[in-house]
Image: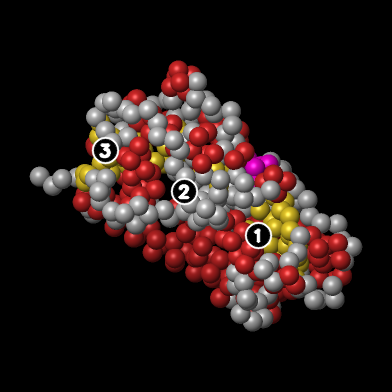
């Protein structure tokens, strides 16, 4: 019989930390009280190797009596590089009975509704575990998706912010951006900066290279437009709402307020060039790292600040780009619920958050009070809004990514002939339909393995 699980021993490999360190090293908290019971925890997680290096190995160093078995999807004929769909996740959970399951938000909602997860409310109460210092919008979202109960904890989240060069706004006498602006307001502000600077400053950058595709996709997500029809799963771009959005984005692009690369930029983040006023940032660790190097040159230094990314006027408290990175849950069928809880509690604890004062590969700590890399004033841009309750599916992500690429391939055609926009959208929908058909065939073949 094929062994469907593989055991990681503590001597497997040297310790690797994949997190980006802005300063110093990983600090492991004081050694906790030893767990007397010898236990082997089964874990279902999509990135087994990273989980072992970043979590399981650290925990085994602190608790030698705890070993880990990670469910190996390759050995049961599943592609470990592909995300688990709902059916496969349910099958794995019921068949191999993991103790701990690391989940995305949609997966968490599904398994909680099916009664496959253990509520941790009684464990939190029994241990007087501090959840008050976790970002409230995160625990609210977890309870909402759990039908009023907490079925897991999330140590990290990801989001985006609109970073701006405060010196440029002061120089040209323009009111800087503020929290919860709409895309229309941000694009108007970008155009205003372009005019005031006589075209010497680009108002807005939201992508490393071509901007129009990313701009349209970002605006579509914020405005809650459907990339795919819910009934058919096929693209639905030929709607009045999408046509209006295309028109607004193209007009902003043609006015010149949106950054257009004229030559290879010196920096990944365009604001560091000194002639871009606002920029979408999602990788804050990389920005802080690159800006620290850029600012070694006194002439390149500037005062920067951040506000929330644009919101939809009907849902000004929702950040379309904010998401919970992963949710750590206990399986309802776990034979080691207490040991599983101790593990989850350890990496979601106040003590662990204090020891990790940097931004990590996985995102931003949900215990935001301990983030020292970003000033508290700027941190508000990352924590003010709530996560998007309607997280896109894998198919929707794929559709959005391909739509962005298709638009960028047709930038010259789109901007040269705005009057043919209707035909352009129909053509994009046709090409995107072909991409999605290929995607569904691949998904079906993978599920039949």
Instruction: Identify the magenta region.
Output: 381-386
Identify which residue is drawn at 75% across, 72% down.
299
Residue 159, percent from left and from top: 59, 50
How many labels were placed on the picture?
A: 3
Residue 271, percent from left and from top: 70, 67
The residue indicated by pointer 3 is 67
Is residue 166 in view?
yes
- Is residue 183 positioned above or below 387 on the image? below
Identify which residue is drawn at 72% across, 51% down.
307
Q: Nearer the viewer, mark 1 or mark 2?
A: 2
Residue 95, percent from left and from top: 24, 37
Foreground of the two, 123 or 431: 123
Foreground of the two, 56 or 206: 56
Q: Relative to 243, is 7 on the left or the right?
A: left
Label 3 neighbourhood size at 10 Å, few (<14), some (14-19), many (20+)?
some
Return the disc, 1 or 2, that comes first in the chain's sequence: 2
Identify which residue is drawn at 57% across, 38% down.
367
The residue indicated by pointer 1 is 280
The residue indicated by pointer 2 is 26
> How far apart are the alpha carbons under marks 1 and 2?
28 Å
Label 1 neighbourhood size at 10 Å, few (<14), some (14-19), many (20+)?
many
Return the disc, 3 or 2, that comes first in the chain's sequence: 2
> How far apart are the alpha carbons under marks 3 and 2?
22 Å
Q: Relative to 299, is 390 on the left or the right?
A: left
Contact, CB < 8 Å: mark 3 with mark 2?
no
Q: Is residue 267 magenta?
A: no
Per the image, label 2 sits on a secondary structure element best described as loop
Per the image, label 1 sits on a secondary structure element best described as strand
- Is residue 390 positioned above or below 146 on the image? below
> How far apart are the alpha carbons under marks 1 and 3?
42 Å
Q: Relative to 389, is 5 on the left or the right?
A: left
Of the 4 image quadrants, the one containing the N terminus is top left
């Amino acid at each position: 019989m094929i062994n469907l699980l593989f055991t990681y021993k503590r001597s497997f490999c040297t310790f690797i930390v994949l997190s980006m360190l802005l300063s110093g090293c990983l600090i492991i908290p004081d050694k906790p009280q030893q767990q007397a019971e010898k236990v082997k925890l089964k874990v279902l997680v999509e990135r087994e190797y990273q989980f072992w290096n970043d979590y399981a190995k650290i925990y085994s160093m602190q608790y030698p009596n705890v070993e880990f078995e990670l469910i190996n999807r390759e050995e049961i004929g599943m592609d470990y590089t592909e995300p688990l769909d709902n059916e496969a996740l349910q099958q794995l959970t019921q068949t191999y009975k993991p103790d701990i399951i690391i989940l995305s938000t949609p997966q968490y909602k599904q398994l909680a509704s099916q009664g496959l997860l253990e509520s941790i409310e009684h464990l939190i109460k029994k241990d007087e575990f501090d959840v008050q210092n976790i970002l409230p919008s995160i625990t609210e979202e977890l309870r909402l998706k759990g039908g009023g109960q907490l079925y897991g904890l999330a140590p990290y989240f990801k989001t985006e912010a609109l970073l701006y060069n405060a010196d440029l706004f002061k120089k040209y006498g323009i009111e800087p951006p503020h929290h919860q602006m709409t895309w229309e307001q941000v694009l108007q502000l970008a155009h205003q900066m372009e005019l005031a600077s006589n075209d010497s400053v680009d108002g807005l950058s939201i992508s490393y290279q071509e901007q129009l595709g990313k701009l349209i996709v970002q605006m579509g997500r914020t405005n809650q437009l459907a990339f795919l029809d819910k009934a058919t799963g096929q693209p639905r771009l030929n709607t009045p709402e999408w046509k209006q959005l295309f028109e607004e984005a193209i007009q902003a692009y043609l006015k010149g307020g949106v950054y257009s690369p004229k030559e290879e930029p010196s920096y990944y983040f365009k604001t560091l060039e000194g002639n871009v006023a606002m920029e979408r940032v999602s990788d804050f660790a990389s920005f802080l790292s690159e800006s620290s190097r850029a600012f070694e040159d006194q002439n390149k230094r500037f005062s920067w600040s951040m506000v929330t990314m644009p919101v939809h006027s009907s849902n000004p408290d929702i950040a379309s780009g904010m998401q919970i990175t992963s949710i750590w849950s206990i399986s309802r069928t776990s034979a080691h619920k207490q040991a599983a809880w101790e593990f989850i509690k350890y990496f979601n604890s106040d003590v662990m958050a204090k020891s990790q004062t940097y931004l990590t590969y996985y995102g931003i700590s949900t215990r935001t009070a301990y983030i020292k890399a970003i000033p508290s004033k700027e941190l508000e841009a990352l924590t003010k809004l709530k996560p998007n309750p309607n997280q896109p599916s894998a198919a929707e992500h794929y559709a959005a990514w391909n739509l962005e690429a298709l638009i960028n391939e047709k930038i010259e055609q789109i901007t040269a002939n705005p009057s043919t926009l209707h035909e352009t959208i129909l053509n994009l929908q046709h090409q995107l339909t072909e991409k999605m058909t290929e995607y569904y065939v691949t998904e079906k073949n993978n599920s039949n393995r």
